[in-house]
């Protein structure tokens, strides 16, 4: 993979696209302009792969004082909707980018039609009546030349008449297409008389019923780039085989020629990137919607608690490659941990509460000073109420502790975060043998977590005052797929066979310090010792809902695994 790295002189090296751009600038190509575009089709919600493309296209424009357009490739009215247009706008803005112009392929429908007429007039396009199955058979194979359509020899006048009537709506869907007349024996399959227009009698989200013929992507894309004066048309690697056709249209029409450059699309382990399959997951209720926090969509990632800074940093770290590879999802998780570690406020919550009574503590309340973020001196501190009865995590007490267990256990002393040393004196079990209550004593001289006599306590646990606790709902998300490559499944199976049935666990009646009673949607917090969490949009007064963005590193789990071995 080719990335932005640093050489021995501490100067950042260029990725291969930047090398092309800088060479073009030095040679005064296009007047040394840099003009890119991000051209999504509004037929679904953007995912993290699109985020990489957004960062690349807008980043190039920013780096070289150029421009970047947002253009919607709205050439298929059967799949597109204004809902997707709005979501794409929101996602690009959330990532931190502003476009220099907002355009639509539909803006150019009239010009594209006129260019199609031009191609007919110079003998480079014709109306074909073959069915889709017939065209596929006539196209040949990569090792066998295709066969020319029997309609390829139609006269210019007949083609213009038929194409005009296609536009006027005289023919049903699928009855005719307009094809480019290129080379049916070309070793490049895309050059074997590709379709330029098809008939679709469906209202368009912007043009209504004005058109009933719509251009194919391969025809509309390059010409839209040309109209907008795009200098560098950055595409993912699957469009490399389309580039000869892209260039053929530009050259044949004798219009401004952008340069198409391909880079490897983003592939992430345990993650599915197909919009079509993501739509299936939504429609078939495997997830709650496009913004389900388990989805790789930008809106889902945002709802889960990822920040735009973390995604931009991720895009920078993975760089720009010429060959497909798979990025470990752990790198993405590393990026959000790094970002939230710097900015997320620390708070105390208990997900699986166990009641602890400090028998020798007075029946009063006091406040402890808690640090908001040790990584940010300007973040300050807050007051956390403390009382005789508290909640701790059930995992922080063990009746018969293992050798390296340093949390609370009978006769053992631990430090309460920001508060006191407590020692377990006894515990209560119910009729099922489950521990329901732990009784402790505390050392009044250890306020703040330090002992005046210098004795050392190895374990530090978090807590919440029972009297002041607020109930919250916590949603623990795991990977949506169990398989490293969700697309790898046995013959006759489906990618859905790799879905993780335990990708969501909802925990009600978790206990949180009162600070979290009414906090803003999408605000992020580090639940001390538990992970990073984000306020979900389902929250309401009296019932806050938190999504786990990413866990913290669990050193105890690693120790347990080693002991088990």
Image (cartoon, rainbow, N blue to C red):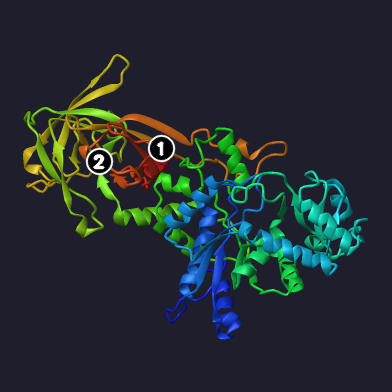
Image height of 552 relative to 2, above or below: above
Q: Nearer the viewer, residue 479 or 177?
A: 177
Q: Give the quadrant of the C terminus.
A: top left
Residue 416 position within the rendered picture, expressed as x and y whole percent measured from the top left = 18, 40
> Which structural element holds mark 2?
loop
Residue 397 shows in the view: no
Q: Position of residue 6 (x, y in %)?
A: 46, 75
Q: Is residue 429 left or right of residue 560?
A: left
Residue 493, percent across and down? 68, 36
Provide residue 497's location: percent of width, then percent of height.
62, 36
249 over 530 or under it: above or below: below
The residue closer to the viewer here, 78 or 362, is 78
- On screen, residue 137 versus residue 412, left or right, reads right
Q: Earlier in the sequence, mark 1 or mark 2?
A: 2
Query: Which label is found at residue 132?
Result: none
Residue ID at (63%, 63%) = 323
Does the rendering let one see residue 463?
Answer: yes
Q: Nearer the viewer, residue 51 or 549?
A: 51
Tell me the residue at 85%/51% (across/down): 135
| Quarter of the image with the N terminus in it | bottom right
Callout 1 secondary element: strand
Disc 1 from disc 2: Cα separation: 17 Å
Question: Total number of numbered labels?
Answer: 2
Crowd tier of the residue under label 2, counting other residues whose Cα lies within 10 Å: few below 14, some 14–19, many 20 or above: many
The local crowd at label 1, few if under 14, some if 14 to 19, many if 20 or more residues have their Cα within 10 Å, is some
Q: In this rendering, would 457 be left or right of 505?
A: left
Query: Which disc is residue 476 wearing?
Result: 1
Residue 348 is marked as 2
Q: Are marks 1 and 2 in contact (CB under 8 Å)?
A: no
**In-image side of 275 versus 174 (left or right):** left
| Residue at the top extreme of this rendering | 431
């Amino acid at each position: 993979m080719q990335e932005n790295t640093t050489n021995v002189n501490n100067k950042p090296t260029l990725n291969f696209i930047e090398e092309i751009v800088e060479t073009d600038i030095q040679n005064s190509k296009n007047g040394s302009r840099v003009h890119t575009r991000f051209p999504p089709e509004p037929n679904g919600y953007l995912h993290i792969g699109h985020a990489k493309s957004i960062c690349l296209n807008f980043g190039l424009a920013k780096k070289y004082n150029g421009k970047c357009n947002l253009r919607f490739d709205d050439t298929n009215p059967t799949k597109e909707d204004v809902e997707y247009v709005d979501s794409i706008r929101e996602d690009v803005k959330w990532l931190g980018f502003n476009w220099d112009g907002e355009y639509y392929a539909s803006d150019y429908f009239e010009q594209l039609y006129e260019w199609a007429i031009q191609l007919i007039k110079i003998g480079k396009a014709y109306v074909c009546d073959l069915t889709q199955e017939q065209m596929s058979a006539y196209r040949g194979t990569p090792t066998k030349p295709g066969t020319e359509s029997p309609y390829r020899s139609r006269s210019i006048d007949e083609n213009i008449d038929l194409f005009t009537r296609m536009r006027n709506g005289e023919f049903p869907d699928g009855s005719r297409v307009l094809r480019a007349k290129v080379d049916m024996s070309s070793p490049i399959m895309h050059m074997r008389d590709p379709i330029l227009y098809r008939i679709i009698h469906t209202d368009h989200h912007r043009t209504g019923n004005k058109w009933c013929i719509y251009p194919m992507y391969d025809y509309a894309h390059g010409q839209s780039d040309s109209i907008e004066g795009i200098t560098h048309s950055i595409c993912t690697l699957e469009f490399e085989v389309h580039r000869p056709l892209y260039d053929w249209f530009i050259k044949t029409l004798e219009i401004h020629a952008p340069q198409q450059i391909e880079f490897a699309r983003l592939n992430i382990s345990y993650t599915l990137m197909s919009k079509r399959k993501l739509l299936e997951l939504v429609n078939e209720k495997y997830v709650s919607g496009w913004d389900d926090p388990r989805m790789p969509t930008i809106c889902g990632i945002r709802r889960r608690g990822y920040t735009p800074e973390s995604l931009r940093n991720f895009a920078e770290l993975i760089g720009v490659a010429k060959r497909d590879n798979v990025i470990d999802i752990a790198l993405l998780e590393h990026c959000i941990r790094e970002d939230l570690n710097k900015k997320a406020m620390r708070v105390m919550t208990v997900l699986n509460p166990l009641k602890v009574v400090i028998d020798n503590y007075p029946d009063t309340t006091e406040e402890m000073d808690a640090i908001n973020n040790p990584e940010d001196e300007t973040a300050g501190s807050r007051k956390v109420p403390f009382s005789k009865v508290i909640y701790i995590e059930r995992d922080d007490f063990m009746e018969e502790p293992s050798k390296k267990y340093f949390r609370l256990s009978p006769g053992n002393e631990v430090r309460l975060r920001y508060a006191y040393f407590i020692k377990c004196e006894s515990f209560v079990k119910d009729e099922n043998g489950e521990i329901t209550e732990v009784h402790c004593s505390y050392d009044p001289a250890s306020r703040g977590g330090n002992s005046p006599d210098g004795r050392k306590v190895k374990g530090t646990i978090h807590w919440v005052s029972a009297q002041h606790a607020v109930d919250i709902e916590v949603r623990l998300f795991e990977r949506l797929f169990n398989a490293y490559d969700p697309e790898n499944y046995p013959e006759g199976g489906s990618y859905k066979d790799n879905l993780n049935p335990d990708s969501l666990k909802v925990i009600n009646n978790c206990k949180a310090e009162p600070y979290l009673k009414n906090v803003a949607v999408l605000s992020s917090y580090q639940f001390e010792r538990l992970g990073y969490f984000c306020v979900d949009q389902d929250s309401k007064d009296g019932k806050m809902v938190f999504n786990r963005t990413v866990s913290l590193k669990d050193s105890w789990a690693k120790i347990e695994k080693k002991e088990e071995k």
